[in-house]
Amino acid sequence: MPIQDFDVIVLGAGAAGLMCAIEAGNRGRRVAVLESNDRVGRKILISGGGRCNFTNVDCGSENFLSENPNFSKSALARYTPQDFIALVEKHNIAYHEKTLGQLFCDTSAREITDLLERECQTAGVQIFVNTHVQDVTKDDFYVVRAGENEFHAPALVVATGGLSIPKMGATSFGYDLAKQFGLKICDTRPALVPLTLSAADCKRYCDLSGLSASVIATAKGRPFREKMLITHRGFSGPAILQISSYWTKPQPITIDLAPNKNLTAPLRVPDAGRNLASAKTAFRTSLPQRLADRWLEHNAPSKWTNQGLDQLEHLAHNWQVTPIGTEGYDKAEVTAGGVDTNELSSKTMESRKVSGLYFIGEVVDVTGHLGGFNFQWAWSSGYSAGQAV
């Protein structure tokens, strides 16, 4: 069995793994990156509709979920969105800002993977694709067996991602490896994922699939003001994806269908008609016509009195819906939960129990909001480990 000696072995050639490899290589370390897919950065290539939402200019620890909400602060301070923007500009990649601080490539996500591959090449990093790791052991150094190859190194970085999008090669390998070395795992679940509704609610609303509205969606006290999309199985769109990271079954979610608007005001003026038809006319000024009509057909008050209008107004801004589940890891953009941050140094990402063992990116219990935050966590955690290995 051919043995190859390195200073650092990185498992996974995604955003976090490649950033770590670049930083370690630039510090003179001999780095091997092992990737099971046939090319690097497959999830990068499909992100942001193929244009890669590579960071968010307004990134802070408040944009992340974790059992320890302070854990991400150190890495995010050490490598900021401005640092990655500088790298993008160094490679003359054109980009633009969309809503809420999100940055996208003007042309293609491939520009980001090309950037990372060029930086790896400059840093002397060796990338091994189509390399399936069978097992990892540790004595005086780490031994990684992959097919007929054996890789040795005193430092091992686990950047294998989470369980989301299994068709891209996602597996539980990183979590299994953490458990093998005695590290705790925070329960994992799909995040940034569409929510599914009961058969009864689907019958009421899901034939409106494709309709969207700007709403405030809230789960567990966390509100997000963005668009909600009705699907064949439930709700999606940015507002719903955001709250999905917080939602747990069997909790309801709350939807404000028309933020900062008084929907029933036209029904309260003198001589206004107070009936279902006039309510539909009023609601259509703020909601898509078919959604306004359908929602009112199921939620209109029994009496069109002032009290009835008050109740209708309240309900439109506090509509409670109880999802029955999510679309699962197949449709989830990321995995919430992961390697317990109490097991890791927030400065270096190294295990507190096992020397030379590092965990970075999505495999760690740090999950970003929608909008480039998960990429920034990948860059920041990868940089921090790359500076330490």
Image: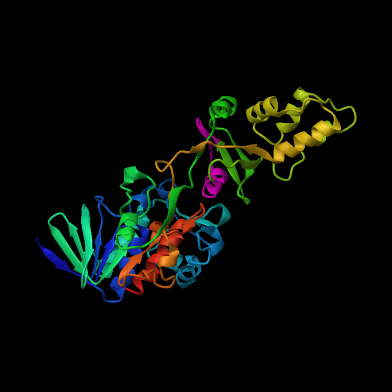
**Residue 78 % position (x, y):** 46, 72
In the shown orientation, is residue 60 left or right of residue 290? Answer: left
| Image quadrant containing the C terminus | bottom left
Quadrant location of residue 298? top right
Vertical arrangement, residue 361 with respect to residue 325, above or below: below
Tell me the residue at 75%/23% (across/down).
Answer: 277
**Residue 387 % position (x, y):** 36, 74
In the shown orientation, is residue 380 left or right of residue 202? Answer: left
Q: Answer whether residue 243 is magenta in the image.
A: yes
**Residue 201 % position (x, y):** 58, 29
Quadrant location of residue 21? bottom left
- Is any part of residue 58 visible from this angle? no
In the shown orientation, is residue 268 left or right of residue 116? Answer: right
> Magenta span covers which residues?
230-247
Tell me the residue at 43%/41% (across/down).
Answer: 328
**Residue 130 % position (x, y):** 21, 52
Q: Nearer the viewer, residue 159 or 237?
A: 159
| Image quadrant containing the N terminus | bottom left
| Outermost left residue | 1
| Outermost right residue | 270
Tell me the residue at 53%/27% (across/down).
Answer: 199
Tell me the residue at 22%/63% (across/down).
Answer: 137
Q: Answer whether residue 387 is magenta in the image.
A: no
The tally of labels here is 0
